[in-house]
Amino acid sequence: MSAESSRTDNDKDGELTNLLDLRMPGDTGAVSEVTDTVCATLTELNIPEEKRMEIALAVQEALANAVVHGCKNDRSKQVRCRLERDRRGRIVIIVTDPGCGFRVEDISDPKRPEGLNADHGRGVYLIRQLMDEVHFENGGNQIRMWKY
Amino acid sequence: MDINARKRGQVQLVQLRGQLRMGPAVDELRQTIEESFGNGDTRIVLNLAEVGMIDSSGIGLLVKFLASAKQRGGSVKLVQPSKFAVQTLRLVGVLNLFEVFDDDEKAVASFA
């Protein structure tokens, strides 16, 4: 994992402050380390614990999807995770993978009776429940999510 | 994640400490429970009092073990899941699949 931290108060995407810009290999073993780094930064920002936990779990799910689906568990591929904050104090997380994306409409509701006993398929649903706004970009290989 | 498994009569009591997330934590718990099943122990109590976060990978594992244990005549029961773990399990609709107890003794006794 490599990390850099910089401030760009007039980001072209909407005056965002860049808090973290991390890159990790397509390895499931690396996911939690990045999540914990994001969580530590949220702690430094005095984000309340409940909100911090919700953001951390959403990040964990987004990174896991990027590694498993975007990188196909290939360590030679790379996932990028950015943590930003806008001028209204909203937290923005952007996770990008090198995969070919997916169709959001193909994701089924894990709370349907046939999905309750499944051992996978809850990640995107959790992200949508935990975050206030979620956008899938570039055909699905980038997720941008906000916590107000 | 720290995993401490011990037998209480016919019940395998597993104490977890840390975050139940994709990677080593989920892999180690999978191995622990599969070893229990391999030994014929299908009555499992998981103490989650010190598990702050469970991700979808961990949830999938718990649900899979519950189904496997029930197929073998046992079950997986939860003790003291943290507030955030309860919230997460409820969000995805699986909390009601599990019996949840305040302490280990009640959970173990429920198998009698």
Image (spheres, rainbow, N blue to C red):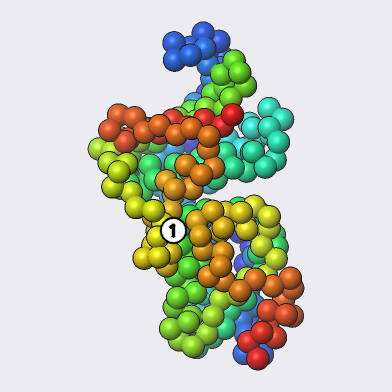
Q: Residue furthest left?
A: A100
Residue at 66%, 84% (x, y): give it.
Answer: B110
Q: Is residue B105 visible?
A: yes
Looking at the rendered structure, the secondary structure element under dot 1 is loop
Q: Quick one: label 1, few (<14), some, or many (20+) residues within 10 Å?
A: some
Q: Measured from the top left, where is residue B71 in percent x and y? A: 43, 83
Name the residue rendered at 59%, 42% in the picture.
A54
Tell me: A24 left or right of A106: right
Q: Is residue A6 visible?
A: no
Point 39% across, 53% down: residue: A109
Query: Which residue in the protein does label 1 denote?
Result: A111
Residue B69 on image: x %, y %: 48, 80
**Residue A71 image-quadrant placement:** top left
**From the image, which quarter does the C terminus of chain B lie in?**
bottom right
- Residue type at mark 1: give it: Lys
Quadrant placement of the N terminus of chain B: bottom right
Residue B94 versus residue B106 in the image, above or below:
above
Is residue A53 found left or right of A68 in the rendered image? right
Q: Nearer the viewer, residue B24 or B16?
A: B16
